[in-house]
Amino acid sequence: MEAAYREAARQLAQQKRCVVLSGAGISAESGIPTFRSKGGLWEKYDPAVYASIEVFRKDPSKYWQIRGDFIRDYNRYQPNAAHRALVELEQAGIVRQIITQNIDGLHRKAGSRQVIEIHGSLREITCLQCGKQYLAPNVPDGTPPHCDCGGVLKPNTVLFGESLPPQALDSASREAQTCKTMLVIGTSAVVYPAAALPSLAKQHGARIIEVNIERAFPDADVVILEKATVAMTRLLEEIRTFIV
Ligand code: NAD
C-alpha cells in the first residue's frame, strides 16, 4: 500500500489538473448509506420499483417513502475528510474538475468549485405541475410533498428511466477525454453512463487511480484499497512532499 500512495501522489503532483469521479463511497463516512454495499438501500428495496420515473409518475409516495430511509434531512449531513482533501487539491491546482454521481451536495458544501453533479442534486426540488422550485430544507411536509398549486414535488435528481442532463454528460465526457489522470473514489462502477468515464479516459491516454474498499476497476493503474477518508488524508500528505 505504501508504494501505491507514493505512486499515486507522484502522478497527481507531476501531471496536475486531474479529474475526479466520485461515487457513494466517498460520502459513506458522512453517514449516508451506499446503495449496493452490504446493508445498502437496494438490499431492502428494488430500485426498479422505488426509484424509477415510471413508478414515480404513477405513485410518487413510493419514492418519498424510501427517501426517508436514505437522506431524510438533506442539511444534516456534513462533508468528511475526503471531500475536504479534494477542496485543498483543487486550490493547489491538482484537481481541475470533480464529476460526482452523488446527489448529496457534499462536494459543494465542502467548498469544491468545479463540480459536475451528473445525477443531479437533492438540493433543488421541482413541482411537476407548475415548475416552481423549492430549496431543501424548505420542502412542504407530506408523503409525497405537494406544491402550493397542488402538484407533486420531485427532487432534481435523475431516476431510473430518465436521461442524464445532456450538458452535464457532455462536459463530463470532455473532461474524461482530455485529462491525464482520473482519480476514481468510492464507486462500484455499475451505473452507466458514469461508469464508462474511466474507460473513456483510459482510451484517451489517462492513468486511473482508484480509491475504494474493494476494487471496482480492473483497468486501474494504481489501486488504494482503503476507506476514502483515510486514503485521501494520507494521499494529501504524500502529495505535499512532492510540491514543497
Ligand atoms: P454504489 O452504492 O453502487 O457503490 C458504492 C461504492 O463505494 C462501492 O464500490 C463500495 O466498495 C465503495 N465504498 C463503500 N464505502 C466506502 C468508503 N468508506 N470509502 C471508499 N469506498 C467505499 O455507489 P455508486 O457507484 O456511486 O452508484 C450508485 C448510484 O447511487 C449513483 O447514481 C448515486 O447517485 C447514487 N447514490 C448516491 C449517494 C449519495 O449521494 N451520497 C448514496 C448512495 C447512492
Image (cartoon, rainbow, N blue to C red):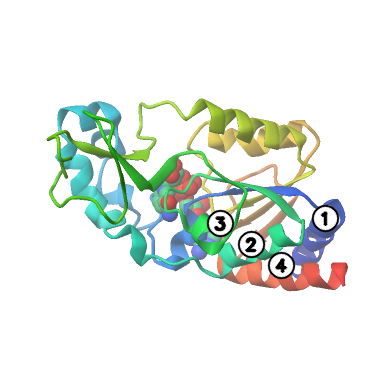
Q: Which residue is mark 4?
A: 235
Q: CA distance from mark 3 to mark 1?
A: 22 Å
Say the numbered circle drawn on residue 214: 3
Q: Which residue is mark 1?
A: 11
Q: Earlier in the sequence, mark 3 or mark 1?
A: 1
Name the foreground residue: 17 vs 236.
17
Which residue is pictured at 47% across the width and 60% down the height?
Answer: 27
Q: CA distance from mark 3 to mark 2?
A: 24 Å
Q: CA distance from mark 4 to mark 1?
A: 11 Å
Q: Earlier in the sequence, mark 4 or mark 3?
A: 3
Q: Secondary structure at mark 2?
A: helix
Find out if the beta carbon at label 3 lies less than 8 Å from the nearest ligand 1 atom: yes
| Left or right of residue 62, residue 92 in this image | right
Which residue is pictured at 23% across the width and 51% down the height?
Answer: 139
Label 4: how many residues lie within 10 Å, few (<14), some (14-19) or many (20+)? many
- Residue type (three-letter) at the residue carrying disc 2: Val
Q: Earlier in the sequence, mark 2 or mark 1?
A: 1
Q: Earlier in the sequence, mark 4 or mark 2?
A: 2
Q: Position of residue 20 (x, y in %)?
A: 65, 49
- Of marks 3 and 2, the one in the foreground: 2
Q: CA distance from mark 4 to mark 2?
A: 13 Å
